[in-house]
C-alpha cells in the first residue's frame, strides 16, 4: 500500500534478482573475463615502464585531453541557446528540432564526418578545428536533451520575480537559472567529455593522417604494431581518466544540487485556494530574498 492507500503491484525481490542473473552472467563471460584475462597476460612491469617512458605516449594523452576539454566547453556553450529555446518556448517545430539534433547524434560517423569536411573551407580540412567542430555537432543533442529537460521543469516564478526587481537577463541567468540547472550541465558536460576523450571515428575520418588520440593509439598498437602490452597500458590509463572524470562529476552534482520544492499539481489533495495562497507567500519571500541578493551584489566589491 502506498501513502494514498492505493494498492501497488510490485515484483518480489527474488524475482527481480533472478532477472539480473542472465545479463550479469553474459557481461561477466563475454566482457569481463576476456578483458581481465588480456590484462593479466599483457600487462607487465616492462610494458608499463616502456609505454609510460615514451614522450610520444604523453603527447597523445595531452592532445586527447585538451581537445576533449575544448570540445566539451564549445559544445556546452553553443548548446545552451537551443536548450533554452526547447525548454522555455512551445512551437510547432519543437519536436522536429529535437528530433533532428538526435538524428545527428545517431548518424554514422563516416556520414557526419564527410558532411563536416564538405561544409568546412579547405583551409580547415583535416585540422583540430574540424575535429572540435565534429564533436560539437555530434554532441549537441546530449546537452540539449539533458539540460533542456531540467530547464523545462524549473518554475518561472523565480526568474519573473528577479526580472521584476530590476535584474537583467544576464543576472537572471547567472544568479537564478544557472545554479539550478548546474547539475544537469555538469552531467551533460561529463558525457560530452567522455565521448570526446574516447573519440575514434571522428579522428580517423576528420583528423589529419597521423593524428592520434588514446583510443586511436590503442587500436594502432594492438592491430598494426602488435604491441598488446602497450595497448593494455593505455587502456588502463584511459579507464583511470574516465573514472576520475565520473567521480568528479558525481561529487560536483551532489554539491550543486538544490531542492526546488515544486508545487504539486492542482487537485492532488489540496484546493486551488490553498495552492494560490501558498504560492503567493513563496513568491513574496522569494522576491525579498532576490532583492537583497541583487542589492548586495550591486553594493559589494567586484570580484
Image (cartoon, grey):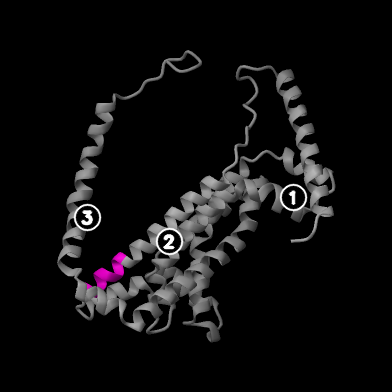
- 58 to 11, vertically: above or below: below
Residue indicated by mark 2: 194
Residue indicated by mark 3: 31
Segment colored magenta: 229-236
Tell me if I can see residue 92 in this picture. no
Tell me if I can see residue 57 in this picture. yes
The residue that appears at 61% across and 40% down in the rendered structure is 153
The numbered dot on residue 272 is none
- 127 to 164, vertically: above or below: below
Which secondary structure, mark 1?
A: helix
Answer left or right for 156 relative to 104: right
Answer left or right for 218 relative to 256: left
Residue indicated by mark 1: 172
- Image coordinates for residue 266, horizontal then vertical, percent: 65, 23
User: Counting residues from the N terminus, which is met first, the one under dot 2 or under dot 3?
Assistant: 3
Residue toward you, 144 or 60: 60
- Looking at the image, do the residues carrying marks 1 and 2 touch, with CB atoms under 8 Å apart? no
Among all residues in the image, which is located at the extreme front? 301
Q: In which quarter of the image is residue 257?
A: top right
Which quadrant is the N terminus positioned in? Answer: top left
Amino acid at each position: 500500500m502506498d501513502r494514498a492507500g492505493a494498492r501497488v503491484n510490485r515484483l518480489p525481490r527474488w524475482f527481480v534478482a533472478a532477472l539480473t542473473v542472465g545479463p550479469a552472467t553474459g557481461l561477466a563471460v563475454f566482457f569481463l573475463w576476456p578483458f581481465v584475462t588480456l590484462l593479466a597476460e599483457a600487462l607487465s612491469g616492462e610494458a608499463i615502464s616502456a609505454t609510460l617512458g615514451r614522450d610520444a605516449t604523453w603527447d597523445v594523452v595531452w592532445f586527447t585531453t585538451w581537445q576533449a576539454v575544448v570540445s566539451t566547453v564549445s559544445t556546452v556553450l553553443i548548446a545552451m541557446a537551443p536548450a533554452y529555446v526547447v525548454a522555455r518556448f512551445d512551437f510547432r517545430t519543437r519536436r522536429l528540432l529535437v528530433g533532428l539534433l538526435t538524428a545527428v547524434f545517431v548518424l554514422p560517423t563516416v556520414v557526419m564526418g564527410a558532411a563536416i569536411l564538405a561544409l568546412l573551407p579547405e583551409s580547415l580540412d583535416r585540422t583540430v578545428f574540424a575535429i572540435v567542430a565534429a564533436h560539437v555537432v555530434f554532441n549537441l543533442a546530449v546537452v540539449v536533451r539533458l539540460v533542456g529537460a531540467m530547464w523545462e521543469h524549473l518554475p518561472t516564478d523565480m526568474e519573473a520575480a528577479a526580472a521584476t526587481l530590476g535584474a537583467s537577463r544576464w543576472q537572471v541567468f547567472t544568479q537564478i537559472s544557472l545554479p539550478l540547472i548546474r547539475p544537469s550541465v555538469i552531467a551533460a558536460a561529463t558525457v560530452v567529455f567522455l565521448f570526446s576523450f574516447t573519440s575514434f571515428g571522428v579522428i580517423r575520418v576528420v583528423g589529419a593522417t597521423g593524428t592520434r588520440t588514446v583510443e586511436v593509439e590503442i587500436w594502432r598498437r594492438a592491430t598494426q604494431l602488435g604491441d598488446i602490452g602497450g595497448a593494455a597500458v593505455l587502456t588502463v590509463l584511459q579507464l583511470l581518466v574516465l573514472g576520475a572524470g565520473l567521480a568528479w562529476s558525481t561529487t560536483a552534482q551532489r554539491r550543486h544540487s538544490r531542492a526546488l520544492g515544486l508545487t504539486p499539481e492542482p487537485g492532488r489533495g489540496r484546493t486551488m485556494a490553498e495552492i494560490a495562497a501558498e504560492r503567493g507567500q513563496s513568491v513574496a519571500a522569494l522576491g525579498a530574498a532576490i532583492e537583497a541578493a541583487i542589492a548586495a551584489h550591486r553594493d559589494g566589491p567586484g570580484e
